[in-house]
Amino acid sequence: MENFTHPLLNSIFSETHQELQTLQKDFSYLQTHFVNIDNNLEIENYEEILEEEEEEEENYEDNEYLFISESKLQKYQQIYNKIKIIENFEDNLNNNKIEKSEKIINNNEEDFIKKINKTICCQNNCLKEKINTKKAFLRNFNFQNLSKNNQDSFLMGYFIGISNLKNTSKGNKRVRISYDYSFDSEEIFLQAFKFIYGVGSTRIENIRTHLSTEDIKIRVHKSAGKLSHTAIFFSTIINIINFTLSYANKWGLPSPGI
């Protein structure tokens, strides 16, 4: 069932947005050329469908009507396959952006120090009495800018260095691992350690468990690198982007504020 605007509004839209008159035709073109609907289709072999999709993706290089550049197509492919895109961030920053980044860092340092003054970490008040706040902020800032894998590697090495094995029974059958936390050669409690590095109890516990079972192997999520079974085919995504770009090149796109 088609939807029409009120007769009183037809003239307004016709005068102010003449390009909208052809919008329905363009979407009909999209449906005809990019969407194949077969209500009687029965999916019997999922692998055959994947093979067809792979063949379609290989043919994109020869498609003269593709509005996406080769470099962008490769970038979209990396995003779709969850491959990390490494770009040189510093080379792309101009002087103004560098100045803004420095201001953000300074503001973050002020906020960090304010949080220290408001936080009661333990009975010894480690954050206020034992640590240098500027060094603590620098460590927190650098740690947060590491990748998650590098953070895990740092924490695993740290826990190995501060761990102590203690026997908890006379027969030495039960062993408990204790950790002596420190920062800048000053002994601190766990709460202060979590504050400085910005990590939670769950993550610390998970890394300890991983160390006891897998040693220093990199922690890998079970779903890492796998696509969801409900994921849209990459070729379909490219078709949608290609249609949007082709329509934008011809008619332009409305401003979000209109």
Image (cartoon, rainbow, N blue to C red):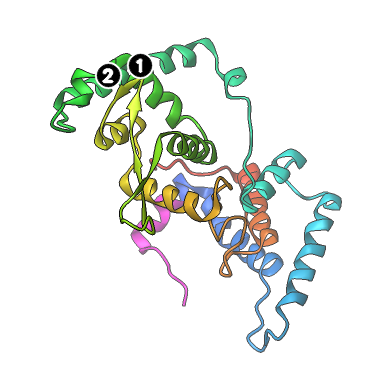
Residue 104 visible in the snapshot: no
List the residue tagged with mark 2: 131
Q: CB of mark 1 within 8 Å of CB of mark 2?
A: yes
Whether residue 53 is situated above or below residue 193 in the rendered picture: below
Given residues 253 and 9, the one toward you in this image is: 253
Q: Is residue 228 magenta?
A: no
Whether residue 53 is situated above or below residue 136 in the rendered picture: below
Given residues 34 and 96, the one toward you in this image is: 96
Q: Which residues are magenta?
A: 1-13
Label 1 sits on a secondary structure element that is helix
Residue 65, image x and y in percent?
A: 78, 50
Whether residue 90 is situated above or below residue 30 in the rendered picture: above
Q: Tell me: 240 left or right of 153.
A: right
Q: Tell me: 22 left or right of 70.
A: left
**Which quadrant of the view contains residue 29?**
bottom right
List the residue tagged with mark 1: 135
Q: CA distance from mark 1 to mark 2?
A: 8 Å
Residue 38, image x and y in percent?
A: 66, 82
